[in-house]
Image (cartoon, coloured by chain):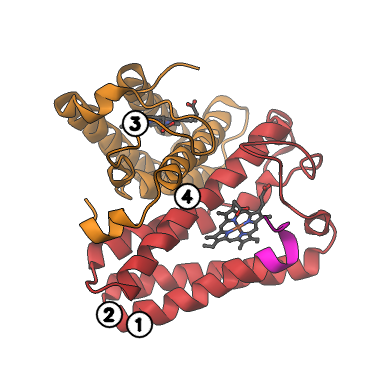
Chain colours: A red, B orange
């Protein structure tokens, strides 16, 4: 959590834009890990860069961007966070912990450089994105 | 650079959205480093998380998102990349290298934990964001 004074300086529309940005950037990095593990050629360096970006975003403390008053509003687009995100803390804790664990593991596996292991770990990580979305994101 | 087959799979509007997301997420992290170095209390852990996210994004190879055909188009919003970004490679190389250097240094300084040094390095890093924007980003 961030300090009261600090969060007081953040405008709701900024918080929404920033969290959408974090997810949007992870989406690129997931897409390129996917291309590498499903494509003909595996580029270790590409997967490492992508996995490191996802890991740093996962560990950045994005929970601070779900400030009170940001359950409605528009960042880059109208927020798609479900109201449950502010009330069902137990489930949120579970899906967020699973995501962090698999994101950290993805960075480790990427650094080791084995394509088959990366493919396997990519599947586990992608499942944790979906695990959160199923509970807390309004479908497009 | 990414492989021809991989980049061929990326839609222009996705590439634009993804690069805007990378910058948007860095903006949050710059904002919270600023709050910490200019505010009353310095939270080392917050600054480390923010600096690590910026570093990983800086090293992620975002240049791959400036595909041919993405000089116009809309991601989260209409692209604000100037046409010069595709033609003035020499200046782009310089500003991008300066940014990477200061982002890597910011992560090191954050880990060391000295607030005054972090403030100084934050200023240097912010100047490299501006250095690129002055040349390559259309003003709001
Ligand atoms: C702990 C919950 C959680 C996790 C984990 C999570 N997301 Fe999301 N995601 C959300 C929420 C909530 C939103 C809506 C944010 C908003 O609009 O305010 C969202 C929005 C998005 C968006 C924006 C566009 C859209 O489709 O709505 C993308 C893309 C996305 N997530 C991808 C990912 C990827 C890829 C991962 C994993 C690498 C991931 N997310 C992990 C909760 C999560
Ligand atoms: C190498 C060039 C470059 C560097 C370095 C750079 N930017 Fe940008 N930035 C751009 C370009 C180009 C765009 C427009 C992208 C688009 O719309 O397609 C942009 C867009 C943005 C946006 C989107 C909204 C807006 O104001 O247009 C933000 C926020 C932003 N940058 C912040 C930052 C921050 C913070 C840093 C440093 C930590 C940074 N940028 C470093 C080139 C750069």
A61 over B54 or under it: above or below: below
- Along the viewing direction, whichever of B114 and B68 lies nearer the viewer: B68
Q: Give percent across and percent down for residue B17.
A: 47, 42
Residue A56 visible to the viewer? no
- For disc 2, the chain is A
User: For mark 1, what is the residue?
Assistant: A117
* Mark 4 to mark 2 CA distance (whole Å): 24 Å
**What residue appears at the point 39 percent right and 68 percent down from the top-left corner?**
A34
Query: In front of the other: label 4 or label 2?
Result: 4
> Seen in the image, is B77 located left or right of residue A62?
left
Contact, mark 2 vs mark 1 (Cβ under 8 Å): yes
* Mark 1 to mark 3 CA distance (whole Å): 37 Å
Indicate which disc residue B133 carries. Answer: none
The reply to whether label 1 and label 4 mark residues of one chain is yes
How many numbered discs? Answer: 4
> Seen in the image, is A44 located left or right of residue A123?
left
Contact, mark 1 vs mark 4 (Cβ under 8 Å): no
- Graded by Cα atoms within 10 Å as few (under 14), some (14 to 19) or many (20 or more), the crowding at tag 1 reads some
User: For mark 4, what is the residue?
Assistant: A25
Q: Which residues are magenta?
A: A133-140
Q: Earlier in the sequence, mark 1 or mark 4?
A: 4
Query: In front of the other: label 2 or label 3?
Result: 3
Contact, mark 1 vs mark 3 (Cβ under 8 Å): no
Query: In front of the other: label 1 or label 3?
Result: 3
Does dot 2 land on a helix, a strand or a loop? Answer: loop
Indicate which disc residue A114 carries. Answer: 2
The quarter of the picture where the C terminus of chain A appears is: bottom right
User: For mark 3, what is the residue?
Assistant: B71
- Graded by Cα atoms within 10 Å as few (under 14), some (14 to 19) or many (20 or more), the crowding at tag 2 reads few
Magenta stretch holds residue A138: yes
> Seen in the image, is A6 located left or right of residue B86?
right
* Mark 4 to mark 3 CA distance (whole Å): 19 Å
């Amino acid at each position: 959590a961030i300090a009261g004074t600090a969060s007081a300086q953040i405008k709701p529309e900024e918080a929404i834009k920033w969290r959408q940005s974090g997810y949007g950037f992870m989406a690129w990095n997931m897409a390129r890990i996917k291309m590498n593990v499903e494509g003909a050629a595996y580029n270790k360096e590409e997967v490492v860069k992508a996995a490191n970006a996802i890991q740093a975003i996962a560990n950045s403390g994005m929970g601070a961007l779900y400030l009170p008053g940001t359950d409605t509003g528009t960042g880059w687009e109208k927020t798609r966070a479900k109201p449950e995100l502010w009330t069902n803390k137990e489930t949120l804790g579970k899906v967020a912990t699973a995501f962090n664990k698999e994101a950290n593991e993805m960075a480790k596996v990427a650094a080791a450089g084995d394509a088959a292991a990366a493919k396997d770990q990519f599947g586990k990580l992608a499942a944790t994105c979906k695990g959160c979305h199923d509970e807390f994101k309004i479908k497009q």
